[in-house]
Amino acid sequence: MWIYLKLLLTALFWGGTFIAGRLLADRVGPFSAAFLRFAVAASLLLALTVRLEGRLPRIHRNPFIGLLFLGMTGVFAYNAFFFKGLQLISAGRASLIIANNPVFITLFAALIFKEKLSWLKAGGILLSVTGALIVISKGDPAALLRGGVGWGEILIFGCVASWVAYSLIGKTIMKDLSPLVAVTYSALIGTAALFIPAVAEGMMREIPRYTVLDWVCISYLGVFGTVLGFVWYYEGIKALGPTRAGQFINFVPVCAILLAFFILGEPITWSLLVGAGFVITGVSLTNMRS
């Protein structure tokens, strides 16, 4: 029961990350925003791990390689794509593209871990991808053939690829490590990797110019979008598996679109609604038990 509540709250927190990310996008560079988000998160995760585990467990060579990939996919690559993409497209559109995460998790879990892929799930994948195409093309799929997809959409699709890798690698890592330890190490590794590009972007020069709202957004992303979100999501993967845990990502675009409408004033267009319907239905079918 508690694990389902945690996954539902995680979806709510992640819906809010699109709003916080969009508010930061125009004032804070993508690598700077990503580094500061995970500097906050890694500090809290490290303190939490030491308190609950007694210390940060030592990692041997093989698990460390997996953790390195976690840090470079789910932290470094995902956030670089996320913040750069939100500079170019709306929060609502970005959230619907990322809503395809569980579809691709299901597909690759079937290929890699031999999880069963029924005709129902295959139909769900087709519906979800169709919905994403409607959203990306703004209701004109023919625009895709005319090169109508912008860099913003391509970058957000990079988030999908990064998160699929993060989820599937995490499934193998958590055979030997707790979700908290796995997330802490991946956050530390990703934060270290983000530091150099953030400095090159001018972060040290710009920090004194950040507003109170900027720091509120960074803190939200670090505490709710990362510490609670990542740990609870990985607890869900460990308890339910990547496919069933990924089902709760259904709620992320719903929260993001509503929050974007009320907070950012982003319009809710017909293509966004139709695409959302396809995506959410497709993801639901993909994760439905036979």
Image: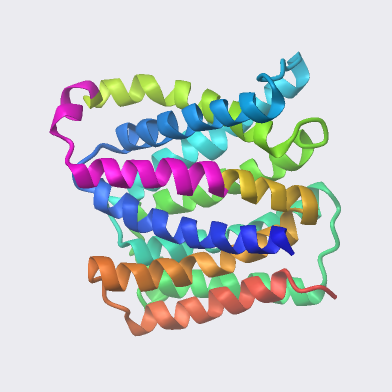
Residue 10 higher or lower than 123, as above or below: above
User: Residue 270: x and y, percent?
Assistant: 36, 85
Q: Residue at x 38, y 30 (%)?
A: 35
Display colour scheme: rainbow
Residue 22 figure quarter: bottom left
Residue 112 is left or right of residue 168, and the answer is right
Q: Residue at x 34, y 24 (%)?
A: 197
Start-end of magenta stretch: 204-229
User: Residue 92: x and y, percent?
Assistant: 37, 67
Is residue 134 visible in this depiction of the protein?
A: yes
- In the rendered image, the quadrant that contains the N terminus is bottom right
- In the rendered image, the quadrant that contains the C terminus is bottom right
Taking depth in this image into account, of 76 and 175 the one nearest to the observer is 175
Magenta span dominant secondary structure: helix
User: Residue 151: x and y, percent?
Assistant: 34, 51
Magenta run includes residue 228: yes
Q: Residue at x 24, y 65 (%)?
A: 264
Q: Residue at x 48, y 56 (%)?
A: 14
Residue 125 higher or lower than 236, as above or below: below
Magenta run includes residue 160: no
User: Residue 122: x and y, percent?
Assistant: 73, 71
